[in-house]
Image (cartoon, coloured by chain):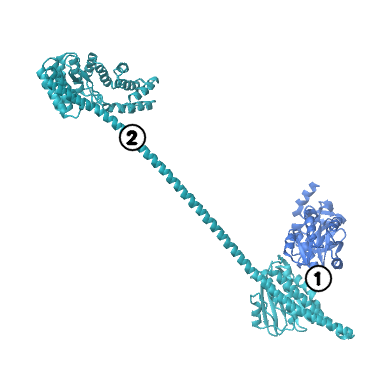
Amino acid sequence: MLLKKTLLLLSFIYCCTVISQKSTIKDHAFFFKKMDSLNTIPNNLLKVTSLFFNNQQWDSVIVYSSKALLNKMQKPHLYYFNYMRGSSFMRKNLFREAQKELEKIPNHFLFYNKVLYALSGVFLEQNKFKKALLYLKKIKEKELSAFDEINQLSITNDIGVCYLHLKDYKNAQLYLSEFLNSIKKKNNTTETSEAYTNIANLYYEQYKDSIAISYFTKAYKLAQKTSNNELKRLTTKNMAVVEENRKDLLKAITYRKESEKWRELVYNQEKIYEVSKLEKKILEQQKQNEINALKLENKAKSFQRNGFITSSLLLFLLLSVGAYFLIQKNKSHKIINTQKTELDLLNKTKDKLFSIVSHDLRSSVNLMQKSNTKLIKNIEKKNYSSLNTIANKNASIASSTYNLLENLLNWANIQTKQLYFHIESIDLYSVVQQIEYNYIPLFENKELNFTNNVKQPSFILADLDSLKIIIRNLLDNAIKFTPLEGKINCKTSIDIKNNATLFIIEDTGIGMDEKMIKELLLESPLLSRKKNQQEIGTGLGIQLCKNLAVKNNASFNIESNINQGTKIILKFPNV
Amino acid sequence: MDNLNILIIEDDEELANDIADTLITNNYTVVGIASNYKDALTKYYQFSIDLVIIDIFLGENPEGITFAETISTIPNALKPFLFLTSSKNRQIFERAKLTNPFRFLLKPFNELELLYAIEMAIEKFYHQTNVFASKSEDTVIADEYLFIKKKNTLKKVKLSSVIYIEVENRYCNIITEIEKFVIQIPLSKINEYLNDRLFKQIHRKYIVNTEVIQEIKISENSLLLKNNHLIHYSDKYKDLIKGFCILK
């Protein structure tokens, strides 16, 4: 901003001079730089104040500088505040305070020239030309550096104006013409016009009207070329005053009118500023409204989005719950299926049991009944000689029926997994001995020669009771298929490689062919029925033995030749 | 050598008598037959018992297991026992199995099976399996007794009545206050199971009952035991004797 004070000469001429006090804030670049570089503790305060100063918020500068001045601060820093405060006072037209503030600064202050310049401005504003001249001269005498950022020319002009007002025309002419000459070189229309005005005023004061008028006209014409309305108004007004004094009233009126016009333009300009400010405000308001609307829209959108997310989440949840139930359903289906197959198997087992019971057990009990009837008849007839054979037959029927029942029960137990199983160390010799004890009458009955050639002791790993079932069944078979006076032998041999014991039951019975062996060893739960056999048998025994052998980690094998006897070989793991 | 005292807990009178007869013929002593839980407990604490034969089902309920559970809760009072059962019902067995260590015998059984089961029960209870069936050993060492197999039966010898043991190859001569006999047992087993507070080895061949030492004849390197048995001790085991003397 230009500080440009129009001084209306209150002498009879009413002409205006122009001083060129241009202490623009722009000229303070070095000043701000220097302030920034100051590394002080309340540096913040200084920065804030300088920022306000730079933005020409004078009131704020005053407030903050007063704060700073209240804090006791290092002197050189204090002067910056003093300067800024003084300058701000001047801008607010509080000249006395400005003068006070500026005069506090001693001459060793880095920017003392600026202070002097500001002081001269203060006095110029108050029309105290003598004092202003004093300060301006002081500056003029000094060697000015670029650092001071003071226009030498404007000092010259200001001194000239001061002399003019002090009516020291000689000196005024010296400085003003110097200014004019320097300005002309710079080819700046506005400043040249100002210089012409001042020169014209100088001559006008001295009543050298013709020269003065020519300068006024020059100034006027130059001013017309510029866009500076204030300058136009000034020059026009000067022209009006000059013409009025020449009594050329017509011209004077036109000039006056023109000047009025310029004044109005200036005024209008101000108005336009205000209007534009208002417009700006309205625009801002509109923008704010738009922003608000956008914000609202955003809110709505985010709400929508949230809604979408929630609904999708809900959907996902629903889906996963559905999937879970589906899986559960499938699982239960699977379980049901496996249960079904299990049940089917159990049902088959049950059917088989029933078939055995209905056929074999029935026939064997039937045989017993018939035999008993015979026995009773014989007793009635007192035919005692045949009683013995019948009783023996009965006994054998009873025992084989009992064996059948026992096997049925055990087999059912295995099928229903109801059998308690405990593998431990067992002496095979003792077990064979124990079983032999029960079979002695049977052997004697058939005059069979039984030998227990099991090595003593033979400790194997097996479940005692299932082992007994196996041996009993095998002995039953051996007795069944061995003719009178045959031999049955139990023996063991050691399989060192597998750390196992081979338990062998051999007989001199009727034996069987390969096909039969294969059939017996076939892994089938189905019970084969033996044909052409008068004795009761279902093949249940061998199946049971095979099953139990597997449970005892034993292998089961048959070696046989027709009419040469059978060898059953079981391989048990050793202790 | 004494007979084993056996308590039979069986509600089937005929079977109980059968068992008792079998046991008596095989030189076991039947101290009593109990037919119910309460009776069984009374008799159990009344007599000095070496083994209990328990029928799992007394009447309708598996009171036999309850009895076994009861005596199992008092570890010091626990004696070897043998379950009798007619079915291998899994549920019952799972419960019976908890009264560890347990042996069972499936009905019906013959004489040999019963005797074998008794032997197995004794072996299992004292954690020395495969003894009685083997040819190389015939003795199980318990806390208070030696259980020795003699033919088809088991005999017991009170350890406190043993004066000394003479080791000879796979055999051991047991010298008690009243008799002298031979058992089959490896030295390693004696060292592992014999009560070492009571018995000390004083020589490669001799293990003595420290309670019956009458005199230590240091000049002769020998011990005078009860019944005037004079046992020579070797230098290798001298320290043992010395430590023992100081304690005395």
Residue A530 picture location, percent across and down: 69, 82
**Quadrant hosting residue A395:** bottom right
Chain under numbered label 2: A
Count of marks placed on residues: 2
Q: Secondary structure at mark 2?
A: helix
Chain under numbered label 1: B
The amino acid marked with disc number 2 is Ile
The amino acid marked with disc number 1 is Asn
Q: Secondary structure at mark 1?
A: loop
- What is the number of the mark on residue B164? none
Identity of the residue drawn at 76% across and 70% down: A430
Residue A126 picture location, percent across and down: 26, 16
Outermost residue, right side? A382
Q: Which residue is mark 2?
A: A282
Closer to us: B122 or A123: A123
Compared across the picture, whether A340 is left or right of A251 comes to: right
Compared across the picture, whether A91 is left or right of A240 comes to: right
Q: Which residue is mark 1?
A: B110
Q: Which chain is blue?
A: B
**Quadrant hosting residue A187:** top left
Closer to us: A30 or B203: A30
Q: Which chain is cyan?
A: A
Q: Is residue A67 above or below residue A537?
A: above
Residue B168 visible from this viewpoint? no
The N terminus of chain B lies in quadrant? bottom right
**Label 2 Cα crowd, 10 Å radius (few <14 / some 14-19 / many 20+):** few
Compared across the picture, whether A203 is left or right of A27 comes to: left
**Quadrant hosting residue A104:** top left
Residue A226 visible from this viewpoint? yes
Residue A560 picture location, percent across and down: 68, 81
Closer to us: A286 or A470: A286
Q: Is residue A575 above or below residue A35?
A: below
